[in-house]
Amino acid sequence: MKKCSAFLLIAAIASAQGVLGGAEHVEPVPPMIGGEAPRTEFAIESAYLLGVFNPPHSYEINADFITARLRWGQYLDSPGIFRGYNQIYLSLLAEPIIRGIENHYFGINVGLRYNFARPGSRFIPYFSGGLGLGWIDSHPDQSGAQGQDFTFNILSSAGISYKFNDRLSGQLGVLYQHLSNAGQTDPNPSLNLLGPQIGFTFAF
C-alpha cells in the first residue's frame, strides 16, 4: 500500500511539472533595431513655438511639418552611445502665426537626423538640424516686422521617439527655429523661436 501511494505521489509530481513546464510564460522581447534600420519614413509633426532671445514682438507660432526621411548609412555594430543611424530628411512647413505681426509662414527644410538605437529598446533618442527657405507675409512698414517675404530658416531639434511597433512610432522633443532674410533688408529683425514638438512616424 505504501509503495502504491509513493508511486502515485511521484507520478503526480512528474505530471504537474510537465504541465507547468509546457505552460511556462515567456516575456515578449521588445522590438529591436537589428541589422537593418528603417529604409524610409514619413512623419507628421507639430510644434508650439515662442519667441526667444529678445524677439522684436511677442510671437507664438504653430509649426506644422510633413517630413520624409531616408536612411543614409548605419552604425548598428558600433559600441557605446554612438550606435545608431543617419537619415536625410525633407520637411514641408506650414506655420500659422498665432501671435505676432505677420500671419503665416510657408517653407521647406532639408537636413540630417541621427538616431541613437539601443538593442532591445523601444526608445530611440535623436537630434537633427537643417537649412531651408520660405515665404512670410511680411509688413516692412511696421517696426519689428520682417523686412521681406522671402526668408531663410534654420531648424534644430532633439528628443526621443518610442516604437509602438515595427511601423509606427511617436516622438516628443524640443524644436528651435530661426527665420531671417540674411540681411537682404535693413533692418532685419529675424525671429528665434523655441518650443515643444510632437509627432508620429510611419516606417516603410
Image: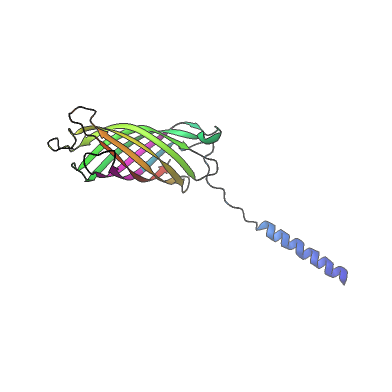
Residue 147, position as x, y percentages in the image: 17, 33
Residue in the picture at 67% in, 57% down: 22
Q: Nearer the viewer, residue 141 or 6?
A: 141
Q: Would you identify the image quadrant in which residue 174 lies?
A: top left
Q: Nearer the viewer, residue 83 or 167?
A: 83
Q: Nearer the viewer, residue 195 or 117?
A: 195
Where does the magenta region start and end?
44-71
Task: Tell whether 54 sits left or right of 158.
Answer: left
In the depicted structure, whether residue 133 falls above or below residue 167: above
Secondary structure mainly formed by the magenta segment: strand
Magenta residue check for 196: no
Task: Tell whether 150 sits left or right of 175.
Answer: left
Residue 111, position as x, y percentages in the image: 36, 32
Query: Please, which residue is most extreme toward the front here?
Result: 54
Q: Would you identify the image quadrant in which residue 101 lies?
A: top left
Task: Tell whether 14 sits left or right of 167.
Answer: right
Residue in the picture at 44% in, 43% down: 160
Q: Would you identify the image quadrant in which residue 110 lies?
A: top left
Picture quarter with the C terminus: top left
Residue 60, position as x, y percentages in the image: 25, 45
Query: Please, which residue is most extreme toward the left here?
Result: 141
Picture quarter with the N terminus: bottom right
Residue 165, position as x, y percentages in the image: 47, 47
In the depicted structure, whether residue 188 falls above or below residue 170: above
